[in-house]
Structures are given as C-alpha cells and as structure tokens.
Amino acid sequence: MALGVNPGLFLNNPSSFRPEEAGYRPAILGTIQLIGGVILIIVPLGISAATYLELFADRTRWYNRIIELNIQNLAGVPSIVFGILGLAFIVRGIFDLGFVVAAGSMTVAILVLPTVILASREAIRAVPSSLLDGALALGATRLQAVRKMVLPAAAPGMLTGVILAVARAIGEAAPLLLVGAATFVTFDPNFWDGGYSALPVMIYSYAGRPQEEFHVLAAAGVLVMLVVLFFINSIAVWLRARFERTW
Amino acid sequence: MKKKLLSAAALMSASVLVLAGCAAESESEPAATVTVTAADGTETTETVEALSGSILVDGSSTVGPASEVAAELFMETEPGVRVSVNISGTGGGFEKFCNGETDASNASRFIKESEEEACLANGVSYDFVTVANDALSVVVNKDNPLQCISIEQLSVMWNQDASGTIMKWGDVPGMPAEIADIDIQLYGPGTDSGTFDFFTEEVNGDSGNIRNDYINIGEDDLLAVQGVSGGIGAMGFIPYSYYQENLDTVKALEIDGGSGCIAPTLENVQNLSYAPLGRGLFTYFSDTALARPEVVAFAEFLVNETELINTTAGYVGLTPAQQTEALAKIAVLAGK
C-alpha cells in the first residue's frame, strides 16, 4: 500500500492477542452510526430551537429567559455529567434503551446541542433584517418570511454549527464509557441492539494494554479517527458551499 | 429553498447512515458440522444448529484481557454469536450485572454481601466459574536491591496508619540499608477494583483498609508498571499477566507469607504455595443467561480451552482438577 498503510487497519476486527492484524472496523462503524444518529437529532432540534428563540420568543417571558440561561450554561458543562444523565434517563429510567448505539447517540446529541443552537442563533442574527422586513412588507406572514427568506440565508452558518458539534461529538469518550460503549467488540454494531464500540473508546482501551504493539495501534487509531472526521465534515463543508451566497 | 435546507440535513445524515449500512455485509452462517468421538473410539459426524445471539460480559480489569482472548477464539468457532467485553472493574461490573444489564461479570474476588443483596433485590440469581489463576505480583523498580518481602512488612507500608508516617524505606523494619533514605512511592488500583479489595483484605486484614496517600491508578494496571519503572523507591501490586508483559521493566518480589520466600511463578500458583497472594479469577453467570445455549457454550469454552486462552493472554490456566470441577458446575447451572 502507498504510504505503508495496511488496509486491515480500517477493515479488520480488533484482536486482543494479534496486534499485527487488529483493525478498527467495529469502532469505525460504531462511530459512524453514532454520529449519524447525533446529526439526525441535532439538526431538526437545534435549528428549530434557535429559530424559535431568535425570531418568535418573547424575551419578556420568564420561561424564555430560563431556557436561554440554561442553553448558555449547558455549553460549559463537562461531558462526563452528560454521561451520567444519559445513564440515568436514557439507558435506564424513562427511555430504558439499554446499552445500545441509540442511547449513545442521544446522550452525545444532548451534549452538543447547545453548540448547534448557539451557532444557529448567530447565523440567524447575521441575516440582514431588511430581508425579513421586506418580506413582511410585501404581505408574507411571519412564518412564511422566516421559512422562505431567513432560514435559507442562515443555512451556511447553521451548518458550521453542525460541523463544530460533530467534531466535538466524534472525540467524546467519557460519556460513551458510561452509556455502555464496550472496549472489546469484534462484530458490526446494530443501532438498536447489542454491544458497540466507538473510536475514542477503542483508542483509550488499546493505550492501556500492557503490550507495546497496542500502543502503536492506539496512535494509528487517532489517525483513523481524523480520517473519519475529515470524511464526515467534508460532506458538511460541501453542503455549506452550495448554500453560500452574497448580498 | 426550505426544501433544499431540509434535504440537505437529510442527505447528510442519510449518507452517513447508508455508509454504515453498506459496510455491514450479511454473514449468514451455515450449520456447523461437528465430529464427535464416542467412547468406543468410533467417530460420528453430526450436524448441529449453529449458535447465535449476543453475550455481554463486563467486570474486572484483571480478568478482562483473558475474556477478550476467549471471546475472540470463541467467535472463530461460533461466528453467529456476538460476544462483547467491557472493563469497569469488579465492583462496577457487579453493579450492572445485578441490574440485569449484563450476562456475565468478571471478578477478581468473590461477590460482596452488599452486591448479593442488590442482585437479590432485582431477582438476578447467579453462580460463578473459576476461569484462571492469578498471582498478585508485588513489583518494585529494577534498581531496588530488595528480593523478598513479608506480608507483615507489606502491611506496615500499606495499611491506613502508614499515611504520613511510613515515608521512607528505612521506616519499614528489616529493609536493606542502601535504600533506607529513599522515599516510598506506592501505586495501587482504585476502589472499584477487585484487586484492591483482595490485596487490602489479605495484607491489611480487612477490605478497604489502605493508606490514603498512595497513588490511585484506577483500573489501568499499566500505569502502575510505568510508575514503578520510573522511580527507584516505587512499589505497586499488579496482576500476574501485567507483570509477565513487563518482565524487563519491573521486578516482582518474592512473598513471605510465613513459610519462606515464594516467587510468583506459574508452578507456585498452581500448587497453591504462593500464599496468600495467589487467587482464583472468576466469571459470574446469571441463571437467565445460562438458560441460553450460546452462553453455556461460552462458559464451557472458557473452561475447556483454559490452556490456550490463558497462555495466549499471559495468565495461569486451570489445573485438570479445577477444570473438572468447573465443568460439573456449569452442567448443574445449565440444568443438564
């Protein structure tokens, strides 16, 4: 292989005693499913929350002020706290999903949601107010003006928020350890069922093994994670470029 | 424009999910053919239904690496079964196990009364199988001239009254003069670890009795190896497998439990002379899990392939007597 990369690093299952053949396949698939789930949750939730708070919410109401305060504070809460929250309410408790990828996705989604909301609000604020006012003056309802004029114009900024959130989500190991990402999985994960692993968890596990070869493998895993991140983000960057426009 | 925005979001997440799906090609397993050698020496070939299902194993960081090897070898013979192994410590493993969230729990000590009650409260009944033997190794720096240490000396260094008073090797009675002025640095696992419970019980008399100024390495035994190899006055206690992987970086002390100095070696563990720090390593199985054929097969595999699993993972396997005992136990649990 060019650059001396063994494709087995991406395609093989991990091994506990054959480091030369061990790969990251279940962890890569686990991370991709996890991030896919995160995107499915944060895009609709984050964008609608931002739109509501920026364009519809009445800031004199006490509940709106509480929501705003909470979102800003949540952005600074350590990720392990979200892990405990996920364990108590998503894995056990109300949702009772068990240790599955879906539970991991929901936990990490809550963790990065404030990032998306804050970035999306900035994006909406950056849209020239003449657009909204013009649409309203021409007889559009407020909902129509927001849907047809403001949101499309704010889309690139919102996607930036999603990119930032995904970049943070992909590297999180602490909350995933709490909601059941296993350190040793040699099969492809299922979103709703059975054990799963993720890249940062796998890297953490390899780094703590007694054999020297696994430490090298952990370093290689970091590169694998960068490749996966680059790949997911390039889709988002491509989308953002499509929506970009100048006034 | 609105449609475009929605489709963009959908496209992004969909493409990610599709990619995940593509890679997961289906691996349908044909029924396995097993050759059975009957007592009279004739071989009969019978077709058995290939096993399927998933097994969740969690627990001790000492037993975990051996379970991973076992899981990997087991899945080579039974590709339809999905075994995942997690490491959250003996105590952490039992917490999930007694909550009914895992099928099997690795342990480097017996289950505690408080944990038993939690299991009982949730209707989880269980029994354990001894899967390997371990020599808890007390390791020091290669440059430390000490060769042998007694349990009493260990207790002087590690018990809770030592905090703040036993700071140099000279503070411990009977230590060589050349290290008397060197500061003691102690590395030990955290309270979720079965190794912690076992060591404190055997050395200091009761579980949890330990000085409060040792360096807590959590569940990462490798950190103790790194710490001990980095300082001449350092000491730590680690599972036999971690010592075996690091023979050239740290030195294990012989242990005097009252009948002379005994080195932590394979023979001494199996003939029980490495006392009191020789111990069994266990996997606890729940009754509901053992009602499933794939879990029974895995449990039997752990015992039958003890030699292969434990030498691969750097552990001390079961003796033939232990094997027979374990197999009989599984048979009873599985209701055979």
Image (spheres, coloured by chain):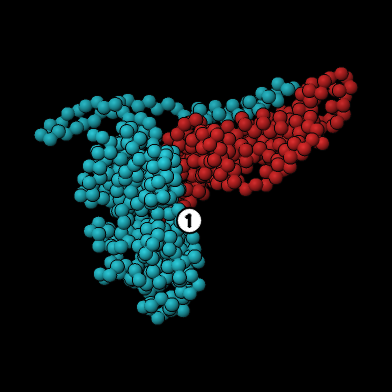
Chain colours: A red, B cyan
Residue A88 location, x and y as percent? Answer: 54, 40
In the picture, which quadrant includes the N terminus of chain B? top right
SS at mark 1? loop
Count up the numbered dots: 1
Chain to which the residue tagged by mark 1 belongs: B
The quarter holding residue B234 reads bottom left
Residue located farthest toward the top when viewing the structure as drawn:
A139
Dot 1 crowding, Cα within 10 Å, few <14, some 14–19, many 20+: some
In the image, what residue occupies the spot 41% across and 41% down? B121
In the image, what residue occupies the spot 28% across and 36% down? B334
Reading the image, the residue beneath label 1 is B218
In the image, what residue occupies the spot 49% across and 63% down? B215
**Nearer the observer, A210 or B195:** B195
The quarter holding residue B49 reads top left
Q: Is residue B329 visible?
A: yes
Side (left or right) of A204 relative to B204:
right
Q: Is residue B58 visible?
A: no
Side (left or right) of B64 relative to A221:
left
Please, what is the three-letter code of the amino acid marked with disc 1?
Gly
Residue located farthest toward the bottom when viewing the structure as drawn:
B177
Residue A36 location, x and y as percent? Answer: 58, 32
Residue located farthest toward the left when viewing the structure as drawn:
B40
**Nearer the observer, A99 or A37:** A99
In the image, what residue occupies the spot 45% across and 53% down? B192
**Nearer the observer, B128 or B277:** B128
The quarter holding residue A188 reads top left
Residue B242 location, x and y as percent? Answer: 38, 57
Residue B336 location, x and y as percent? Answer: 23, 34
